[in-house]
């Protein structure tokens, strides 16, 4: 795969990806890679499907940062993150993406069919429920309110690009109070507490029929 070029000497890396280079997005998620970019208050944002060979060093580095490792549990050798990414690619209902803000990769996302995921055993799932996992990989971008802004932008993309989806769901660890706060600021409502195999989570839901007009 071609390397990710840098914007200038010493500057943050900028991602450039042609349509012919993008891996095919799963039909179960209405081709995430074709959703396009969206304007946000902090710049133009785009979800770019992960290429494991190209993106593993970056994602593996993020997973080993203490603030991330405490909740994602993927710290350690790069092979651990690689196995996780390839499992997502194989399961067919999850799609890992880089979040690219103004050309710079700065976050990692998993967009998945919650109704086809083991999560559906723990809450009253509806057909086409779409789930979101997010980490802000760039440490300098954390604590600035970006999580809520980008979550709102991505859930808007989901609802715009997936007409069959009536709501977006998430299940952040209840100990991760910044994550819970970000979902609330993005228009999600706290629906229930869930006892999941690896955590006690808050079921967060953003309903299409209660969607705010921005």
Image: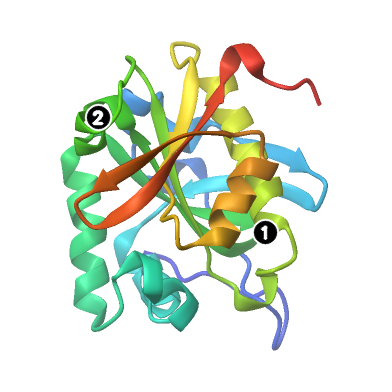
Q: Secondary structure beneath disc 2? A: helix
- What residue sits 50% from the left and 12% below the top? 163
The answer to which of 101 and 2 lies nearer the viewer is: 101
Residue 117 occupies quadrant = top left
Residue 25 shows in the view: no
Extreme residue in the bottom direction: 10
Horizontal arrangement in the rendering, residue 135 relative to residue 7 (left or right): left
Above or below residue 126? Residue 65 is below
> Does the residue at mark 1 contact the one at mark 2 (Cβ under 8 Å)?
no
Looking at the image, is mark 1 or mark 2 nearer the viewer?
Answer: 2
Looking at marks 1 and 2 on the same chain, the residue that comes earlier in the sequence is marked by 1
Within 10 angstroms of label 2, few (less than 14), some, or many (20 or more) residues?
A: some
Residue corresponding to mark 1: 103
Residue 116 visible: yes
Give the left or right position of residue 39, taking residue 103 as reference.
right
Q: Could you tell me which residue is drawn at 29 percent across and 56 percent down?
A: 199
Q: Quadrant of residue 186?
A: top right
Q: Secondary structure at mark 1?
A: loop
Q: Is residue 49 left or right of residue 102?
A: left
Residue at numbered disc 2: 120
Q: Quadrant of the N terminus?
A: bottom left
Q: Which mark is residue 84?
A: none
């Amino acid at each position: 795969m071609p390397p990710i070029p840098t914007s200038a000497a010493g500057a943050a890396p900028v991602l450039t990806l042609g349509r012919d280079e993008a891996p095919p997005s799963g039909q179960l998620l209405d081709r995430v890679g074709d959703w396009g970019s969206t304007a946000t208050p902090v710049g133009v944002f785009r979800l770019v499907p992960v290429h494991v060979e190209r993106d593993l060093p970056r994602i593996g580095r993020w997973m080993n940062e203490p603030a991330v490792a405490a909740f994602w549990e993927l710290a350690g050798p790069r092979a651990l993150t690689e196995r996780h990414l390839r499992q997502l690619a194989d399961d067919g209902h999850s799609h890992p993406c880089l979040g690219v803000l103004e050309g710079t990769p700065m976050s990692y996302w998993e967009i998945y069919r919650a109704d086809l995921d083991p999560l559906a055993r723990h809450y009253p799932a509806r057909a086409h429920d779409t789930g979101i996992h997010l980490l802000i990989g760039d440490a300098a971008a954390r604590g600035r309110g970006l999580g809520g802004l980008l979550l709102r932008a991505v859930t808007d993309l989901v609802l715009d690009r997936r007409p069959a989806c009536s709501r977006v769901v998430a299940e952040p660890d209840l100990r991760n109070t910044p994550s819970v706060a970000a979902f609330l600021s993005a228009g999600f409502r706290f629906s229930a507490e869930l006892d999941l195999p690896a955590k006690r989570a808050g079921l967060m839901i953003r309903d299409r029929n209660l969607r705010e007009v921005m």
